[in-house]
Amino acid sequence: MYCFRYTGMKNRFFRMALRRAAKLLTKRSGLLLLLVQLSAKLGTVNWRAISIPSVKEKIFTFARLIKAYALGHYRDVSWKSMIIIVASVIYFVSPIDLIPDFIPLTGFSDDMGILLGAFSSVTKEVEKFLIWEKTAARLL
């Protein structure tokens, strides 16, 4: 977590995303709107140009966790972890960040760095969610 906090906190755009995430966590409709924005953004990404194949799955895992949290289905996650998760998604969907997304090849590099840093800092929370998700799927 220290490494992520150090690199992420130096980025003023991510600090803004953290503040927005803290406000958004109390608003179900805001979280669901963020997921709509995420879906739209995912459609614009050239996944072949991204050299880290697991990034896509990590983003989808964050999206499922945010949805389960927003709908009240899953709340066994710390407030701090949710702020990091939501902030990383806000940063990803935002057109204004450290390296603008329209710059070829490098435009998404800061977004991927923030997402991977966030994922590594909340890995235990994500693992708990994935176990819950598998259990919940079997119950349906």
Image (spheres, rainbow, N blue to C red):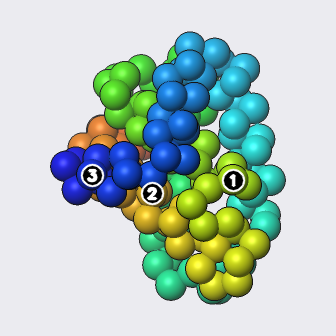
Residue 96, numbered label: 1
Residue type at numbered disc 2: Ile
* Residue positioned 22% across, 48% down in the render: 1
Mark 2 — residue? Answer: 114
Secondary structure under badge 1? loop
Q: Secondary structure at mark 3?
A: helix
* Residue 91, x across and y down, in percent: 58, 49
Residue at the disc numbered 3: 6
The local crowd at label 1, few if under 14, some if 14 to 19, many if 20 or more residues have their Cα within 10 Å, is: few
Q: Quadrant of the C terminus?
A: top right
Query: Residue 68: where, in percent of width, then height?
Result: 54, 29
Q: Are marks 2 and 3 in contact (CB under 8 Å)?
A: no
Residue type beneath disc 3: Tyr
Q: Quadrant of residue 134?
A: top left
User: For the point 19% across and 49% down, which residue is it?
Assistant: 2
Q: Is residue 49 left or right of residue 40?
A: left
Please determine whether, in this image, residue 13 is positioned above or below residue 45.
above
Farthest residue in the top direction?
26
Q: Say if residue 105 shows up in the picture.
A: yes
The x, y position of residue 125, in whole percent, is 30, 38
Q: CA distance from mark 1 to mark 3?
A: 21 Å
Judged left or right of residue 20, residue 120 is: left
* Nearer to us: label 2 or label 3: 3
Residue 97, located in which quarter of the rendered image?
bottom right
